[in-house]
Image (cartoon, rainbow, N blue to C red):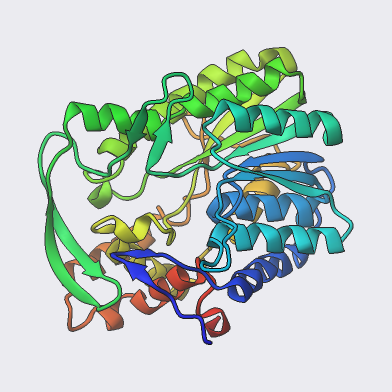
Amino acid sequence: MELKPRFRGFICTNAHPEGCKEQVRKQIDFVQQQPRLTNGPKNVLVIGASKGFGLSARIVSAFGAGASTIGVFSGGQGNARRGASAGWYNSMAFEEFAHQEGLYAKHVNGDAFSNEIKEETIQLIKQDLGKIDLVIYSLATAKRIDPQTGKAYYSVLKPIGTPYHNKTVHFHTGEVTNVEIQPANEEEISDTVKVMGGEDWRSWMLALKEADVLSQGVKTIAFSYIGPEMTHPIYRNGTIGRAKDHLEATAHELSEELSSVKGQAIVTVCKGLVTQSSTAIPVIPLYISALYKVMKEKEIHEGCIEQMNRLYQDFLYSNQSLSLDEEGRIRIDDWEMRADVQQEVAKILEKVNSENVYELTDLKGFREDFFHLFGFEADQD
């Protein structure tokens, strides 16, 4: 029977195992065509390794630098009645390809926020690798259970202070409408920071340090997004932005706390891309569709794997001194934020409506990337 995507709202609830494997293979093929990272990482821990930037960073580490990798993720393995998650299929495909190349690759599957998964990961590092020289923190989730109290916290994506009005698009139908999003209350703001801020990143790094599994000169990376002014009320100046502010403040604190091992914690600001969460954020699908159109025409479009390859090649492991912005961040959103790109995107968004959305934007590419997240339409690349 042909496997087709199933939806609950904007969420795809199933995945195609062979399609997921094909998407992983294509990322590996891309990395293997790039210059070898001769001074890249040796032993890498990726927290949030099953999709998005985490998966791509793991691929660049392994197939670009020959690193041994441990991936931490939460992915359903499936059963006789229900298939596995896309994250599980991605991770199993990655490990299969890595083992074929003679690369060390193992995983820890469970709630990365929990103390138990942290301890299980530390024991695996001690047993197999000894020490880690790069830690990628790439968790993006709507829920976190505090391991100390057992209380559940939920993140929301809302403006702060006043309602937000703008155009949005239903990416399945192409219907462009106006949307109003009500502001968050104080509890929603603090809960979002609890889930998406830097608290758990810091908890991971201090646990790894205390266990003496961090190499001298260790680097740790977490990801953020800024975006253009039009998205700031819903993103950078909204609840998620508060969480990202906390994440970035945590990076500075962590660098001090890791000074005894000459460690460095850095936030990397990435470009806007199609993710499971971005599809459900009003305004963002329309903005990304316009952005894709402009950046593809200028031949500067990047997906997750291109972004992570550039992060490693041009920043983390280049022969030049590490280039940071005034806030101490790596900026691989630099091409997205170019003035000429943003000016053209703004013009598109001013004119776009339901009748011309497929002409003015790359909504078709947005939809394809969404389905690729779950292994569907893999043959349309």
Residue under the image location 24 percent in, 57 percent down: 282
Find the residue positioned furthest to the bottom.
1
Residue 284 image position (x, y, % from top left) = 30, 58
Residue 338 visible in the shown view: yes
Residue under the image location 36 percent in, 56 percent down: 278
Residue under the image location 54 percent in, 67 percent down: 83
Quick check: 66 left or right of 347? right
Residue 215 image position (x, y, % from top left) = 78, 25
Find the residue positioned furthest to the right.
102
The one nearer the camera, 97 or 214, is 97
The image quadrant that residue 265 belongs to is: top right
Quick check: 256 left or right of 123? left
The one nearer the camera, 191 or 282, is 191
Give the quarter of the figure containing the C terminus. bottom right
Residue 350 vertical placement versus 186 (above, below): below
The one nearer the camera, 283 or 230, is 283
Residue 57 image position (x, y, % from top left) = 64, 50
Residue 315 image position (x, y, % from top left) = 65, 43
Residue 310 visible in the shown view: no
